[in-house]
Amino acid sequence: MPGTLINMLARHRPSDTAVETGERQTSYQQLLDLALAIREQIARSPVGSGPIVIADDPGAVACATIAAAQALGHAYVPLSVSHPAARIQQILDAAQPALIVQSDRTADRMADILPGRCPVLTISSQLLNVSWTRSPRPTESCASPIGSGTAYVMFTSGTTGRPKGVPVRTESLTAYLDVVTKRFGVRPGDRASHFFDLTFDLSVHDIFVTLLGGGTLVVVPAEQRMLPARFIREKDISHWFSVPSAADSLHRVDALRPGAFPHLRQTLFCGEPLRWPVAEAWQAAAPNSRVVNLYGPTEATIAISDYVLPRNRSRSNDVYGYVPIGQVFEGQRGRILSRPEEGEPPNRGELWLSGSQVVAGYLDARDSRNAFASDPDGTTWYRTGDAVELEDGGPIHFVGRVDHQLKVSGYRVEPAEIENAIHRRFPACRSVVVQCERGKRRGLVAAIVCGQGDAPTPSAVRDACASSLPWYMTPAHVVELVSWPVNSNGKIDRKAVRRQLEEETAPDMAAGQGVKS
Amino acid sequence: MKERSELEIRDAVLRLVSERVDEVPLDDSASLLANTNLDSLGVVELLVAIEEEFSVSIDFVTVDPAELLSIGGLTGHLSALGAKSSGG
């Protein structure tokens, strides 16, 4: 890595804009001053060695706090204040932070949630004032499972009904940044999007790559993320990074017109499979941009493989629906575990990853059991759960999942976590959550079958989810079924559930088709 | 094909919204993204259905999507476009 963030902030032109949020611009000098002020407050206070929780939306406060945390050797843990209190509490319990940094924008919301004893540092959104809302006391710091050497911890959906903490080591982040600052770097004068929420690890790329390079980080407001064409043009974005969903939506409403984004020079996509027609329409809309498909689970530090869209599409691409995920970064390792007994050829199977970018395990070792494997020589492999195929003499292609995991706007969603939340509130009901891509109901759909009594209303089911899970895990639709379709082993056939829901055309379903209204 | 009045446009928008949400927000200025079960995918599908219903093409390269996230915003935008009845 070129240096720590705080050192690099000092090297850029002080008057250049580092972070732009709406009309508000924060210069490199202002961001550096804020980072130094936060560092000083923390350094001269008796806080423990645990992580620094950041409870704010993307912006200058978060960037400065991350720079200060890195300079002090603390890991950081992002929180989204829009998530339910119960979820935030689970994360705080697991992380045992040394302190929480909030802004005056999020202070009211956090006041209802915060544990009584954790120190809280509040930063005014005018960036002028850093003060303790609850001061640290020497005797109160408690041991955290997150030690030094960890850069950040992201919490993702887990099958057990509680979020899984992924602790990413400093050396992993350094290895990632070494590759991407060379390949996809940003320079002074460039304007790079800050699309991702802080709880999504792709935000780490936005912040580090842009600020290490001296560019301007332009925060994309939530209401612009859905259809960002006007935003890209109006804000003169030169470097765009988002989930493919944003491009998908623009393609759907015919906004990817040839030449629409003449100023874009680099586009990165990551977090979901990228479909060919969408990638090609984006390339035509941004003729001066390189378009790159990145791939990588949170457990392998942001992204671990890349594929640059060729100017001329090769015919072999038609075999697969998605743009390839490319080659694993130099120095990292991937292997494909095929199951010949299920008729898989040796070049097709689950992708396993190893190397300095791959985490050693989850924060809670119980979560690691089935996800990590060790070779006799001690090499740790992360089992991604992604089914891939290595094209003969070519790149790796994403084919699908080996389990039931879903992606919503790039966020990982374990259906079991949603199903557990529904079952806890409505013990008489069993549910199956699927993702519909066709028909009237698109997105996450919870199908429920209730043993006795009246079924809960759709909004009651959604409320049960919304009170304990992040927004992206709340089903858009709830449908009561008469009975479950089962496979030859007598298990619920999830694919059949999805097909059934996708084939239903009426907005309110009539009984008699296996679906109750 | 005759031009629809703003009231007729609102009614048609309301119908398309109510086909897709559990509960229609009472406030015309409420964001459909924040106040209904529609997610971004659902809103995009709604916008596509609205374009079809009104036989209009919304230019998302120049229009601010934030202005189209409410029943009031949609009605206003479609009125300005001079939305016609579909099918005449």
Image (cartoon, rainbow, N blue to C red):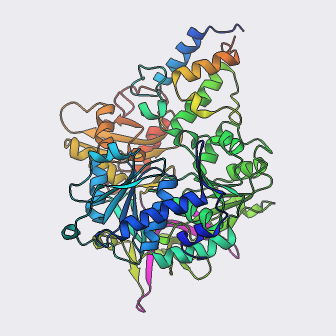
Report the front residue among A421 and B6: B6
Name which residue lies at 69% across and 23% down.
B56
Q: Is residue A399 magenta?
A: yes
**In the figure, is residue A229 to the left or right of B45?**
right
Q: Is residue A207 visible?
A: yes
Name the foreground residue: A123 vs B15. Answer: A123
Percent coordinates x, y for residue A101 in the rendering: 37, 57
What residue is shown at x 47% (from left), y 52% (from top)? A128
Residue situated in front as seen by the camera: A363 or A318: A363
User: At 36% across and 36% down in the image, what residue appears?
Assistant: A478
Q: From the viewer's perspective, tell me whether residue A308 is left or right of residue A515.
A: right
Residue A242 pos. (x, y %)? 59, 53
> Can residue A322 be seen by looking at this rendering?
no
Provide the residue span drawn in magenta. A376-403
The picture places residue B74, in percent across and down from the top left corner, at 58, 23
Position of residue A373 measured from the top left corner of the image (x, y, whole percent): 39, 79
